[in-house]
Image: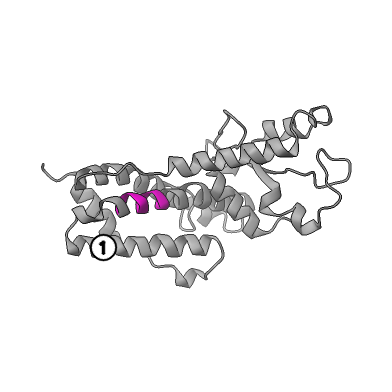
């Protein structure tokens, strides 16, 4: 039994692409630097060890349970090694790992919680950097990026693109949607229609990343939404 794509995507998305170990939160994907290609550092550690003799191994688990999202925690290599050292089994029991995973995922959700904005420009200021971050991910790692074109079958490049969608684009889209839900009434009916188009895009994009729908079902990103945010950001007060 192997970890399924569904469990991988849930784990990376819920963890925000960050190490779940307390006070670490290291970013687990990295862009190109010099001659080095984009790469991931994230390791999907088993809470109950996957092999007999491994730390916290539970012989009563089925193979499916062992490789399920519920039994996985996303860590950097340093902390994965730390929790799996034989001498540390008592220091990092199952209950502790479940708790730090839950705490970390709660932190990620809280980070996405939007402070209600009272005017259009405040909303635009909140959204603009999130859109910019998403656009940079697309430019650097997307299927039309220079690296993807030069390395069409590069597994490492695809892994970074997948993890960036899960750890950056999906969480950013969620936050944008929350900001808009709080402040949509600050916009005109015509602008609200553009916002609705973005929200449709964000929901369908997340469903595609989670393998719930085919790519053909994704609503294209509405350029009018980016233009609306940009125009609002620079509008005179």
Q: Is residue 41 visible?
A: no
Magenta part of the protein: which range? 173-180
Quadrant the C terminus occupies: top left
Q: Nearer the viewer, residue 226 or 109?
A: 109
Magenta stretch, main secondary structure class: helix
- Residue 72 rendering spot, x and y as whole percentages: 69, 47
- Residue 29 rendering spot, x and y as whole percentages: 56, 41
Q: Nearer the viewer, residue 118 or 140?
A: 118
Q: Is residue 67 left or right of residue 233?
A: right
Residue 28, above or below 10 = above
Residue 123, above or below 223 = above
- Residue 234 rendering spot, x and y as whole percentages: 17, 44
Quadrant the N terminus occupies: bottom right
Q: Who's the residue at 43% across and 62% down the image?
A: 203
User: Residue lying farthest right?
Assistant: 53
Q: Is residue 178 magenta?
A: yes
Q: Is residue 66 visible?
A: yes
């Amino acid at each position: 039994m192997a970890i399924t794509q569904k469990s991988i995507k849930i784990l990376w998305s819920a963890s925000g692409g960050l190490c779940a170990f307390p006070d670490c939160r290291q970013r687990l994907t990295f862009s190109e630097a010099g001659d080095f290609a984009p790469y991931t550092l994230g390791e999907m550690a088993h809470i109950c060890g996957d092999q007999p003799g491994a730390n916290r191994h539970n012989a009563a688990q089925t193979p499916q349970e062992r490789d399920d999202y519920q039994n996985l925690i996303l860590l950097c290599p340093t902390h994965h090694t730390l929790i799996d050292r034989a001498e540390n089994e008592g220091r990092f029991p199952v209950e502790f790992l479940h708790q730090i995973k839950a705490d970390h995922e709660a932190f990620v959700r809280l980070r996405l919680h939007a402070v209600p904005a009272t005017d259009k420009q405040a909303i635009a200021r909140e959204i603009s950097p999130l859109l910019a971050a998403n656009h940079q991910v697309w430019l650097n790692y997307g299927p039309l990026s220079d690296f993807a074109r030069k390395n069409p079958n590069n597994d490492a490049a695809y892994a970074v693109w997948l993890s960036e969608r899960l750890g950056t684009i999906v969480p950013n889209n969620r936050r944008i949607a929350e900001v808009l839900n709080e402040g949509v009434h600050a916009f005109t009916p015509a602008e609200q229609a553009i916002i609705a188009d973005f929200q449709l895009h964000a929901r369908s994009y997340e469903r595609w990343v989670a393998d719930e729908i085919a790519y053909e079902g994704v609503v294209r990103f509405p350029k009018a939404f980016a233009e609306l945010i940009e125009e609002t950001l620079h509008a005179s007060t």
